[in-house]
Amino acid sequence: MEENTFQSRIDLGLLTEQVNTIKKEIGKVIVGQEQMVELLITAILADGHVLIEGVPGVAKTLSAKLLSKIISVDFSRIQFTPDLMPSDVVGTSVYNLKTSEFEFKAGPIFSNLILIDEINRAPAKTQAALFEVMEERQVTVDGKTHKMKSPYLVVATQNPIEQEGTYRLPEAQLDRFLFKIVVDYPTLDNEVEILTKHQQRNGAQPLTDVNAVLSAEQVQSLRQALHAVHVEANLIRYVAQLVNETRNNPMLFLGASPRASLAILVSAKAHALIHGRDFVSPDDIKVVSLPVLRHRVVLSPEKEMEGISADDVIKLIINKVEVPR
């Protein structure tokens, strides 16, 4: 009886096949970066926005454009600059001479998959324009609310904040991203493979051979499967303990909010799914905790001056909190 229940909850075979197909399509263009690819797929299932940080030239923008090819949905790209205004992002009301009425002209934020390139190049007033749409999937202009189509996913890229011409994102903005993925330089072998693939393309665009794998309906179906993923009560407590520890750690000036707890829980369920399981393990929670928490905590000034990173502190917390047996 239990075996039939297990099979009826989720078609794990079909889901695993779809995940492997996505990885195969991404692998046509992106070399290495397995963790980033896995976290992007996890974010799609968990219905969460993603922030990708790295120096210029490590395929941050290319990765986001790849998602737009793999998921057959509407796509828009916004290049953030210091002079970008909120109305350039969400849209504005325009007076129509024929009807003698104001009409709302939607901005580029109205799409299914939005790539915001170099998000930390724009000032705070433009960042604030994203608060409502990222959290509530809607925009309010002139007292009228406009709903977004589903699925709705924001993938933003940013350069390290130490670089010239960047603004530190407000904590409230960062908290709306499910993951912050840090992309490092490729290994020597991976860079050789990148160069080899470029040579073999003979001038063809890297996205030419990438095929659409998922429709909007399929994305919604995969997300529904999350509800059937089982989480033991002691693992729910484990998530709460990890987040609570960030609020009581002397090395951190600001800890993570309950939104972080929810983010770890839902992304751990998505991570379990893409690995062919309908139950969450402690390892799922450990894997997603770092990208969920690294942008939601603020180091104490003393530790920041010592060169300690948020990643270092989060890893210490993960090692400190006892794993349920």
Image (cartoon, helix red, strand yellow):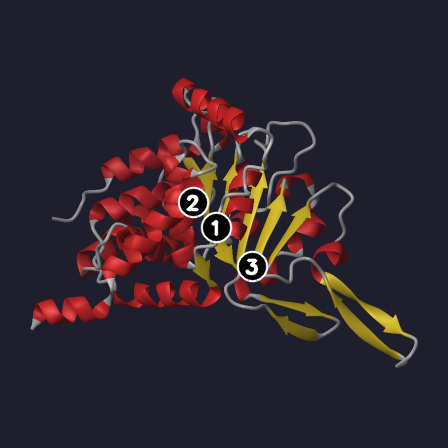
Q: Is residue 55 above or below residue 17?
A: above
Q: Earlier in the sequence, mark 2 or mark 3?
A: 2
Q: CA distance from mark 1 to mark 3?
A: 27 Å
Secondary structure category for the residue under label 2: helix
Residue found at x 11% / y 48%: 325
The quarter of the rendered structure image containing the N terminus is: bottom left
Q: Which mark is residue 25?
A: 2
Residue found at x 41% / y 24%: 190
Q: Earlier in the sequence, mark 1 or mark 2?
A: 2
Q: Nearer the viewer, residue 100 or 18?
A: 18
Q: CA distance from mark 1 to mark 2?
A: 7 Å
Residue found at x 57% / y 41%: 157
Q: Tell me where residue 74 appears, x and y as whole percent.
A: 59, 60
Badge 1 local density, few (<14 within 10 Å), some, or many (20+)?
A: some
Q: CA distance from mark 2 to mark 3?
A: 27 Å
| Amino acid type, callout 3 | Met
Q: Residue 266 vs residue 56: left or right?
A: left
Badge 2 local density, few (<14 within 10 Å), some, or many (20+)?
A: many
| Amino acid type, callout 1 | Asn
Q: Tell me where residue 159 appears, x and y as whole percent.
A: 59, 33
Q: Residue 15 vs residue 183: left or right?
A: left
Residue picked out by circle 1: 211
Secondary structure category for the residue under label 3: helix
Q: Which mark is residue 187?
A: none
Residue picked out by circle 3: 134
| Amino acid type, callout 2 | Glu
Q: Name the front one of labels 2 and 3.
A: 2
Badge 3 local density, few (<14 within 10 Å), some, or many (20+)?
A: some
Q: Tell me where residue 284 appears, x and y as whole percent.
A: 26, 47
